[in-house]
Every structure is written in C-alpha cells, then in structure tokens.
Amino acid sequence: MALLFNYRTDQTTNSITVTTGYGACDTLKSAEAKEQADSVIVTITVSREPDSSSTCQVAKNHDVTLTLKAPLGTRKVIDAAGGETIATVKPTP
C-alpha cells in the first residue's frame, strides 16, 4: 500500500503530481485518477515480491504525475484508500 502525502498541480497543463511513499522494495503497479465534478480520487497501487527482506520496510518518497481530462480547478484531491483529502503543496515564490 502507498501513502499519499501531498500533491501539486501545473496550471498550464491538466496534470497533478502526487508525492507518495512506499517501501524500498515495492514497485509501482498502477496510478489512477478518477475525476468527478467536485473531486479527483487518486489510487496508487504497489506490489512487493513475497520473499522481500525486512529492509524493504524503509519507505521512500516518489512523485507520480497523473494527467487529468480537465484542469483541477477547485476540485479536491482525495486518497481512494482512506477517503482523506490530500494536502496541496504551496508554490515556492
């Protein structure tokens, strides 16, 4: 399972970049954004080899960029796993 920490959006494109954390031995299996009128629900799926060592418990942060059909606008970004709203990263001045 991946943890979703925050996201940032590019106002010039229809994309969001989600910062996610998962084990050092995990592999990104899929990333999906389900768009609704008032939200975008993000699902990040990872997989791990069954014989992975205990050192795989060390989490690493990864950025995953998802392309949306329409600009994010005022829609909330929601973690599909827990239903929580994901925080946005404020742009650096």
Image (cartoon, rainbow, N blue to C red):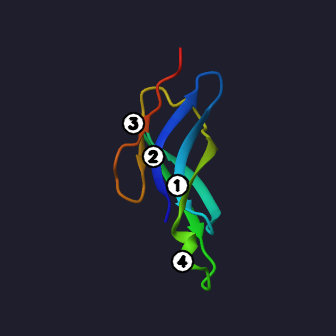
Marker count (numbered): 4
Quick one: label 2 or label 3, which is nearer the N terminus? Answer: 2
In the image, which disc is placed on residue 21? Answer: 1
Q: Amino acid at mark 3?
A: Asp
Q: Is residue 37 above or below residue 91?
A: below
Q: Residues within 10 Å of mark 3 (few under 14, many from 20)?
A: few
Side of 58 relative to 27 (left or right): left
Q: Residues within 10 Å of mark 2 (few under 14, many from 20)?
A: some
Element at badge 1? strand
Foreground: disc 2 or disc 3: 2
Q: Which residue is mark 2?
A: 5
Foreground: disc 1 or disc 3: 1
Q: Are marks 1 and 2 in contact (CB under 8 Å)?
A: yes
Foreground: disc 1 or disc 4: 4
Q: Which residue is mark 4?
A: 54
Give the distance between the C-alpha atoms of the residues marked 4 and 3, in whole angstroms: 40 Å
| Picture residue at 39% right of the left edge, 36% below the top | 38
Task: In the displayed orientation, state which residue is furthest to the top.
Answer: 93
| Picture residue at 61% right of the left edge, 37% below the top | 69
Q: Amino acid at mark 1?
A: Gly
Q: Which residue is mark 3?
A: 38
Name the one closer to the observer, 21 or 79: 21
Residue 2, given in percent of the width and then of the height, sits at 50, 60
Name the one closer to the observer, 48 or 42: 48
Q: Is residue 42 above or below residue 87?
A: below
Q: Amino acid at mark 2?
A: Phe
Q: Residues within 10 Å of mark 1 (few under 14, many from 20)?
A: some
**Residue 29: in sight, yes or no?**
yes
Quick one: label 2 or label 4, which is nearer the N terminus? Answer: 2
Give the distance between the C-alpha atoms of the residues marked 2 and 4, in whole angstroms: 23 Å
Give the distance between the C-alpha atoms of the residues marked 1 and 4, in whole angstroms: 17 Å
